[in-house]
Image (tube, helix red, strand yellow):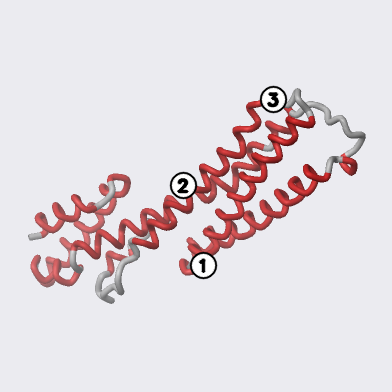
Amino acid sequence: MIERYLAELRRRLPFYCRRRVLEEVEEHLRLSARAVGEEQAVARFGPVEEVARSFCARARRFYAALVLAAAVAFPVLAYPIPENQLPPAPWPSADQMPSELAWKRDAIVWLFAAAAAAGAVALSGYVWRRRLFAPAAFGSLVALLGVGSLGTILYAQWREQVPSTPAGLLALGPLQIAVALVGLALLWRSRESEPLAQHPEDAANDLAL
């Protein structure tokens, strides 16, 4: 019976967490079966559909957290590229930057600060308080979408003002948007596949990815 349960669970699990989940579920079922028998152990563990949905949600939250960390780190890691490749600006000082560029630059800074703060809350919540993760991660990723969108417009307008600006810099904003969208998709999928209320005896469902 345990083998049939595991075979059905394998078909329902995504490949990226299948091996580890199956190993841990099998270990739990084998230990439980020694005390109550295979049939009762499987019954206590829960319907395979709910178990698979639970682990899928946890896997997607885990990868959403990884993508969130990458999305927050991206502007920091990418910053040296425009810093080193932007040609000298024609205006005498930063205070004299054209207003259509200046407000976007300032908005990007504030959006990134908000995204970093919300991202820190989300990643801390992932470890310590799971209920905080989804709303904080959503706020951070939406703010990062704003960073990427405004950054794309800013570089395009900057190139109009400074024609020698490398065209490759225009790719930074869309890359930021793409990473943030992947994180939002994973976050949404994890909430879509949230399991129903779990049986208190389903100890293996507390396995964290």
Residue 33, horizontal then vertical, whole percent:
12, 66
Furthest residue toward bottom: 200
Q: What's the residue type where badge 3 is placed?
A: Pro
Residue 97 bears which disc, if any?
none
Foreground mark, 1 or 3? 3
Foreground mark, 2 or 1? 2
- Residue at numbered disc 1: 132
Residue 158, horizontal then vertical, whole percent:
75, 34
Query: Few, some or many C-alpha atoms within 10 Å of disc 3 (few <14, some 14-19, many ≥20)?
Result: some
- Determine the residue positioned at 38% across, 58% down: 190
| Residue 27 located left or right of residue 153 | left
Q: Nearer the viewer, residue 91 or 40?
A: 91
Foreground mark, 2 or 3? 3
| Residue 89 image-quadrant placement | top right
**Measured Cα–Cα span from mark 2 to mark 3:** 27 Å
- Upstream in sequence: badge 1 or badge 3: 1
**Measured Cα–Cα span from mark 2 to mark 1:** 20 Å
- Determine the residue positioned at 64% across, 47% down: 147
| Residue 168 located left or right of residue 22 | right
Query: Few, some or many C-alpha atoms within 10 Å of disc 1 (few <14, some 14-19, many ≥20)?
Result: some
Element at label 3? loop
